[in-house]
Image (spheres, helix red, strand yellow):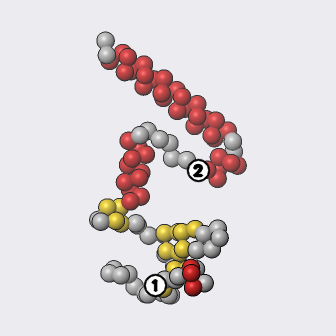
Amino acid sequence: MAGFNGSYTTSNPNAGIRAISSTSIADAKITIDGGANGSMRVDVPLIVNGRDVMREIDEMRDAMLLLKRDVDMESKYPRLKEIKDEYEAALSKYTTFDTLKESK
């Protein structure tokens, strides 16, 4: 891979090997667990065809006026989700009000 130091090993779950990991001295920046409860973690910018995927997702969220959520904190403090829902309901009302007001 251009721009990466160290080497990466890939595996074939069909052969019983279930991970992709870095062999560099530093911690692996990309890990894939192909087990029954598999997961993938990417701790580097994800660039696809020159486009930063996470930046574009953040821009879409902002354009859609979606709040950035912390699901772990919401499960710990249920009032956070209630406040988020209240805010979204109020925002929807004000947006509708502005749309009607501007159409006159």
Query: Disc 2 vs disc 1: Cβ atoms closer than 8 Å?
Result: no
In the image, 20 versus 72, the foreground residue is 20
Camera sees residue 21: no
Q: In which quarter of the image is residue 102?
A: top left
Query: What amino acid type is highlighted by mark number 2?
Result: Asp
| Residue that numbered label 1 is attached to | 8
Residue that lies at the very extreme toward the left in this rendered image? 50
- Residue occupying the point 64% across, 35% down: 82
Quarter of image, res 36: bottom right
Q: Which residue is drawn at 40% across and 66% down?
A: 46
Badge 2 element: loop
Residue projecting furthest to the top: 104
Q: Quadrant of the C terminus?
A: top left
Q: Residue 70 carries which label?
A: 2
Name the residue: 56% across, 79% down.
13
Q: Is residue 56 visible?
A: yes
Who is closer to the viewer here, 102 or 21? 21
The local crowd at label 1, few if under 14, some if 14 to 19, many if 20 or more residues have their Cα within 10 Å, is some
**Residue placed most toward the observer, 40 or 80:** 40
Residue type pointed to by label 1: Tyr
Q: Position of residue 6 (x, y in %)?
A: 43, 87
Q: What element carries label 1?
A: strand
Return the disc, 2 or 1, that comes first in the chain's sequence: 1
The CA distance from mark 2 to mark 1 is: 32 Å
Position of residue 95 measured from the top left corner of the image (x, y, whole percent): 42, 25
Identify the image quadrant of residue 16.
Answer: bottom right
> From the image, which quarter does the N terminus lie in?
bottom left
